[in-house]
Amino acid sequence: MPASTYEGFGNAFLETLYFKKPILVNRYSIFQTDIEPVGFAVAIMDTYITEETVKKVWSYKED
């Protein structure tokens, strides 16, 4: 599935929260300014996936 580097506060994010599924977010500009300060529990990446990001996503999977 293609990823976008520019998104708004869209339905996918809201639906994922509603269904209590883990979220992996690339820190696009709207996320940084409007969503990240709220403090949602999400795995965050900056353009590239790191080992720390993978561990965070796996920790969600184990819950």
Image (spheres, rainbow, N blue to C red):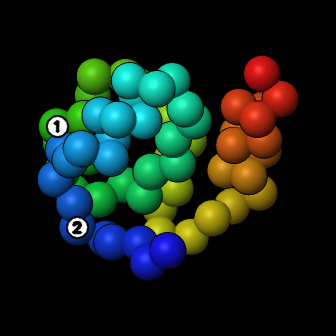
Residue beneath disc 2: 6
The crowd level at tag 1 (other Cα within 10 Å; few <14, some 14-19, many 20+) is few
Tell which of 2 and 5 is nearer to you: 2
In percent of the image, x 22 and y 60: which residue is there?
7
The C terminus appears in which quarter of the rendering? top right
Instruction: Give the Cα separation between the discs numbered 2 and 1.
Output: 13 Å
Tell which of 20 and 49 is nearer to you: 20
Residue 14 found in image quarter:
top left
* Mark 2 or mark 1: whose residue is earlier in sequence: 2
Question: What amino acid is labelled 2 in the image?
Answer: Tyr
Tell which of 32 and 61 is nearer to you: 61
Residue beneath disc 1: 34
Q: Is residue 32 visible to the viewer in this orientation of the structure?
A: no
Residue furthest to the right in view is 62
Question: What amino acid is labelled 1 in the image?
Answer: Asp
The percent position of residue 27, horizontal first and vertical second, equals 37, 55
> Could you tell whether 48 is left or right of 27 in the image?
right
Residue 49 found in image quarter:
bottom right
> Could you tell whether 31 is left or right of 63 in the image?
left
In percent of the image, x 44 and y 78: which residue is there?
2
Mark 1 secondary-structure assignment: helix
The percent position of residue 24, horizontal first and vertical second, equals 52, 48
> Could you tell whether 8 is left or right of 60 in the image?
left
In percent of the image, x 35 and y 35: which residue is there?
15
